[in-house]
């Protein structure tokens, strides 16, 4: 397979409601959309999950555009590709970091490859599920009552798991109140690195609430302190930001830094690496779930495909499009019915990019041949 043309688009979609975490507020979503056309005319699509500002990690829309334009696209356009695994294992191997940029173009190659084989992306990855269970990620609200109202609404929609963003001062009281109202719901907390080991006693208070996990309590690039914290917490730690590769996952498991891992395809450099982490975690008895980065429909489609692999045991963040966008850039939109999403059987990502909506939300586009 040979990619003859790549188009980058800087997209901007307005979130239905601002998304508040321990590190900032997102009112709308800027991201790069990658379109790759093969010599036989097949088109593959993927999204970069890099944010406008370097708040989740060091990558941004601008750094991605530079790495894609000056390094990754020239490599792809001059290479023959017999399998998408070659993109990360060979073609991009010498390029350090920039995982979200790499994942964006590797994902488009995977989509095109699956389409040329006439199989779904899920099938191409080795997925086994017909449906996936999904939950919701609920940002920091103006009040605990507001958080309770959001949970009530999502519970009625049938979502399978409730992730609450926490930070110092918005943690124990919040979880306590939620547990008073909802003693049994599958509940977890995501701290986005808002704590340090000095907060150990405060974090241990959360052990009283039967949380599924506490996600990324400590520094974004740490696995040592997380191992010390996990040794005293009965609640499983889930790592998100700390895991960028198969090697990071291996070391975190070896050290006992976590009992669960949140896979984000963009954070780990693409679907090939995500599948390798999946296989290691399956051998090691570490359950996975697929995290979200407020993706639009094409990114959500990739998340659905990877979540179809068997060790994605826990509900992920890939909720329905309607929770995020007035209108999505795919048809049909991603629909979660009673917290379940059917894994598409059509070739590739299984959702049709909506070119009219893509143009509507494109701020800038550039073609590379
Ligand atoms: O896409 C979703 O609904 C998940 C959103 C979400 O929880 C996150 C998005 C982006 C960065 C973080 O704030 C956070 C996460 O850590 O998972
Ligand atoms: Mg997270």
Image: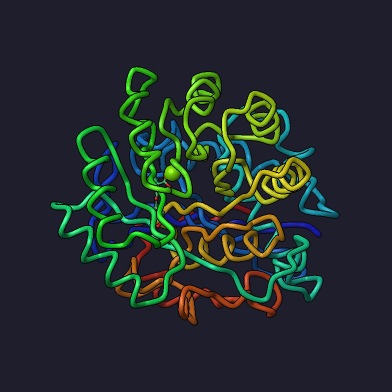
**Res. 153 image quadrant:** bottom left
Which quadrant, please, contains the N terminus? bottom right
Q: Is residue 68 above or below residue 295?
A: above
Q: Nearer the viewer, residue 122 or 161?
A: 161
Q: Position of residue 111 (x, y in %)?
A: 67, 64
Q: Nearer the viewer, residue 252 or 74?
A: 252
Which quadrant, please, contains the C terminus? bottom right
Q: Is residue 120 above or below residue 22?
A: below
Residue beneath the point at 40% across and 71% down: 321
Q: Nearer the viewer, residue 244 or 41?
A: 244
Side (left or right) of 100 relative to 152? right
Residue beneath the point at 70% across and 35% down: 246
Q: Is residue 355 visible?
A: yes
Residue beneath the point at 39% across and 53% down: 163
Q: Position of residue 297 (x, y in %)?
A: 47, 68
Side (left or right) of 132 relative to 347? left
Q: Position of residue 289 (x, y in %)?
A: 57, 53
Check the image and name the residue furthest to the right: 82
Q: Nearer the viewer, residue 339 or 85?
A: 339
Q: Is residue 77 visible?
A: no
**Res. 60 image quadrant:** top left
Give the image's coloring scheme: rainbow
Q: Position of residue 225 (x, y in %)?
A: 49, 20
Q: Is residue 129 above or below residue 6?
A: below
Query: How many numbered tags mark residues here?
Result: 0
Side (left or right) of 352 relative to 157? right
């Amino acid at each position: 397979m040979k990619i003859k043309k790549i188009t980058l688009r800087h997209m901007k979609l307005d979130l239905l409601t601002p998304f508040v975490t321990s590190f900032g507020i997102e009112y709308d979503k800027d991201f790069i959309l990658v379109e790759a056309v093969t010599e036989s005319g097949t088109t593959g699509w993927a999204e970069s999950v890099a944010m406008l500002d370097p708040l989740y990690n060091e990558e941004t829309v601008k750094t991605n555009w530079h790495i894609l334009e000056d390094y990754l696209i020239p490599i792809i356009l001059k290479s023959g590709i017999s399998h998408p695994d070659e993109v990360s294992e060979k073609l991009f191997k010498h390029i350090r970091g920039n995982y979200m940029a790499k994942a964006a173009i590797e994902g488009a190659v995977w989509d095109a490859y699956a389409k040329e084989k006439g199989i779904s992306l899920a099938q191409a990855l080795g997925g086994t599920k017909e449906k996936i269970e999904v939950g919701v990620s609920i940002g920091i609200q103006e009040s605990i009552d507001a958080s309770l109202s959001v949970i009530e609404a999502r519970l009625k929609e049938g979502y399978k798991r409730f992730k609450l963003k926490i930070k110092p001062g918005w943690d124990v009281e919040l979880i306590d109140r939620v547990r008073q109202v909802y003693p049994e719901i599958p509940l977890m907390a995501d701290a986005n690195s808002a704590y340090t080991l000095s907060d150990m006693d405060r974090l241990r208070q959360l052990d009283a609430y039967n949380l599924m996990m506490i996600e990324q309590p400590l520094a974004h690039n740490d696995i040592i302190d997380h191992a010390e914290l996990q040794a005293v917490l009965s609640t499983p730690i889930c790592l998100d930001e700390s895991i960028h590769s198969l090697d990071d996952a291996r070391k975190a498991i070896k050290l006992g830094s976590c009992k669960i891992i949140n896979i984000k395809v963009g954070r780990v450099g693409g679907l090939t690496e995500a599948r390798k982490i999946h296989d290691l975690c399956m051998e090691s008895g570490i359950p996975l779930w697929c995290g979200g980065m407020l993706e639009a429909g094409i990114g959500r489609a990739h998340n659905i495909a990877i979540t179809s692999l068997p060790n994605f045991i826990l509900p992920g963040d890939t909720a329905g499009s309607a929770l995020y966008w007035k209108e999505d850039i795919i048809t049909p939109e991603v629909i979660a019915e009673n917290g379940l999403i059917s894994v598409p059987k059509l070739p590739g990502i299984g959702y049709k990019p909506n070119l009219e909506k893509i143009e509507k939300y494109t701020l800038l586009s550039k073609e590379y041949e």
